[in-house]
Structure formats: structure tokens, C-alpha cells
Amino acid sequence: MKVKDRLSLQFTFMFAVLLIVVLSGIYVLAAGNRSQTFFDKLEDRALTAGQLYLAQDNMSEESFSKVIKKYPQSLSHEVIRIYNDKNEPVFIKEDSVHWSESVIKRVVQEKKVRFTNGDKQVAGLYYIDNSGNFVVIASAIDDAGFQNLKQLLWIMIFFFVISLLITFFLGRFFATIALQPIAQIIGKMKIIRATSLDKRLPVNTYRNDEINQLSLTINELLEHLEQSFSAQQSFIANASHELRTPLTTIMGNAEITLRTDREKEDYKNTLREIIKEVEELNKIINSLFELSQANMDSFTVETVRLDELLWEAVDECGHKLKNNPIKYSVPAYGEKCTIQGSRRLLFIAFSNILNNAVKFSNNSEVTCALELNETSVSVIIADKGIGITTADLQKIFQPFYRAPNSQGFQGSGIGLSLADKIIKLHNGTIQVKSEINAGTEFKIIFSR
């Protein structure tokens, strides 16, 4: 079922419930008013009958003539009975109904009584006259009132059905108009493909309704998709280039060696070069694997103490490069410097940044520190090496990017990109400050 049809049915159903409540209320009020009006007529008939048969001698001629004019106007199936103090009937009109003593006594006690007996409505009153006290009971059937109620009911049913039909088609019409912007969005989204992710939906800057918000959200999604596709293409191109370089070296060395017979030592040197390139190739493949794993948002979450993790990264780096002094300055914060995350991934991120600092420090001191405040915990790794230009600071986290002044150093350009993705997975940020030939400072901030 289409949304516009479902909305039309839902709106029609709500309107039907509301209309039923309103019409039912009108019908109940009309029925109550009919009953009240007819009881008033019955009381007036009972009073008229009492005046006609019991109070002739106490009324003026003019008043009595008015009573005589009113009395012939009888009601449908009207029955009037008058009883004296001994509960004996003194007047009977239409001898078809007999009232019990309990009914007569109730009239005497309450002075005025109204009740329903089957289809008939009954009104009784206690009439006091100079010749005695009497009970007058009048009953009748309100045929005209019931007929009017029946007509009212059919009119209500007719207009109820007509109103529902009109409401459904009007609701469908307005739902079509309301959903027209969504239909336009669907039409424009159908023409957007992987090759045209640069296209965007039109957005009205002066509107702040749900349709405009939907367009903005879709545009943001398209922006992320475009960036992801672009990053993927760049990643594949750079990965192909980085993998091709050691493979080309290996093949070149092997081909040159096989062209002519050489000394045993030459073969050994060639094999050493091949092993070196294979190791470099293995490092690149491992880095690519780690980079792909860092793109996955699922990892085992555990409590990680950043001071211990940083010390482990420093210790591992110190074993590899003993000539580079690393100054580790972290107070004993204990449990205060813990975050939730993956210990393995965070270790890779710290190690990559630390290895970069050592590599580009020109054998100068590298410092590691930890800062703690009420809202965050920060890891600071700083060196006094070659530094990074302002233009290159915006690119250092791109996969395989290497600044021009780093070309003389061994590396693949994956380490910082991998570290950045890992830190972002842990809802952290990296701030970098650098100056050429003065050094670089990486500040990794985690919210607490």
C-alpha cells in the first residue's frame, strides 16, 4: 500500500472516530431532549385533566375555557387516570392501563413522578383541591418524537458515509501534495550513481521543515559516500604503486642476476637484496591489513590504561632504536587515565606516531607525556626533528602521503593514516603543531 493511501485511510479513520463521537453526542442530546419535552407535555396533560374534572368550581370562566380548549389535544395512545385519597379511580380516560398502589403511593410521597413503562412515558402529580387530594397519572407514547429521532438517525448515517468518502479523497489529494517533494527527491536520487556522487539535492536555506532536513541528510550521506569512494580509489592507486615498487626491484635484481653467470657472493648479495625488498613488501602488506581493519567499526572493547600502553610503545621502540633517546614523563595517574577501547589498535596508533617521531628526530630527544583534566586525557609525543610545513599538515593523514622533506627516510606513508583512523574510532582527535627544522608535536585527546 502506498504511503498516500495509508495516510488517507489513517486520516479517514481518525475523522470517522471523531465524527461518531460528535454524532452520537448529538443523538443522545436529541433523545434526552425529546424525552424531557414529552414528560413536560404529559405533566401538562395531567394538570389539564385535573383542572377540567376537579377544579371547575374554583376557576374563572375564562381560565376554564382555556382548559377546555387544551384538553381535546390528546397525545398518542394517551391514558389518564385520577385517584382519590382511597386510591379509587374517580376518572378514567382509555381504560387500558391500571396502576398499582405502589405507583400511586410514590406519587403521593414525591408529589411529581416521571418514569417509563415499556414504550410509554408516564407522568404523575399530586393534585390538591378543595374537595380533596387526588393523584393524576397520564401516560402516552411519543410516536412523533420517535419518528423524528429515526429520521435524524438516518440523516446522520447518510452524512456520516458521505463525509467519510469526501474525507478519504480529500486526504488522498492533500497527501499527494504533501508527498510531492519526497517523490521529487526519489526521482533525483534515481539518477545518482557511483559515477555521479558529486550531484546534490536542492536545499532551500529559508526552510526548516522535515523535507528540507531530509534533503540535507541525504546530501551529507552523498558527501560521505563521495569521500569514501574517492578515498577508496586513492587507496587502491597508492597501494598498487607502493606494492609495485618492491616487486619491480625484486624482479629487476633477479633478472639481472640470471642474465650471466656470477660469483657465489654476487648471488648471495642479490638474495639479500631480494629478502630486504620482501621484508619491506611484507611490512606494506601488514600495514595495509591493519589499515583495512581500522576501517571496521567493530572491535573488542576493554578498559585501557593509557600510561601503561604508552610505556609499552616506548619500550618496544627503545628496543628497536637504542641510539634514539626517548624521554618518558608520565605521573602515576592510575585508574584516572583509562578509556574504553581496543588495546591492540591503540598500541598500533601510539607505536606508529612514536616511530615517526624517532625516525624524523635526527637522533635528537623524543618526549612522551600524559595530561589529565576533568573532561579529557591527552597523550603528547614530541620531537625536535625536521618538522612539517603548514601545507603538508593538512595531508599527513592521507594514506601513502609522504611530505617532500621526508623522501630521504624509509617508510610507506601508512602509519599516520592508520593512527588517525584508530584514534577516530575511539572518539579521539589528533592535534599537530610543527615547525620546519624545529620539531613536531602530536597531541592525542580522548574525551572522558
Image (cartoon, rainbow, N blue to C red):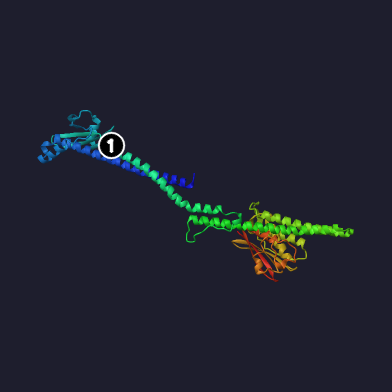
Task: Please state which of residues 431 and 158 is positioned toward the viewer in this rendering.
Answer: 158
Percent of width and height locating residue 308: 69, 58
Compared with 86, 307 (above or below) is: below
Q: Residue at x 61, y 61 (%)?
A: 376
Which quadrant holds residue 13?
top left
Percent of width and height locating residue 244: 74, 58
Residue type at mark 1? Answer: Gln
**Residue 405 visible in this rendered orientation of the protein:** yes
The residue wearing badge 1 is 147
Q: Quadrant of the C terminus?
A: bottom right
**Residue 426 visible in this rendered orientation of the protein:** no
Badge 1 element: helix
Task: Please state which of residues 358 and 148 is positioned toward the viewer in this rendering.
Answer: 148
Which quadrant holds residue 140?
top left
Q: Residue at x 10, y 39 (%)?
A: 61
Q: Is residue 27 left or right of residue 222?
A: left
Q: Residue at x 30, y 41 (%)?
A: 30
Q: Is residue 84 left or right of residue 371?
A: left
Task: Please state which of residues 55 and 300 is positioned toward the viewer in this rendering.
Answer: 300
Compared with 120, 346 (above or below) is: below
Which quadrant holds residue 313?
bottom right
Residue lying furthest bottom in this view?
437
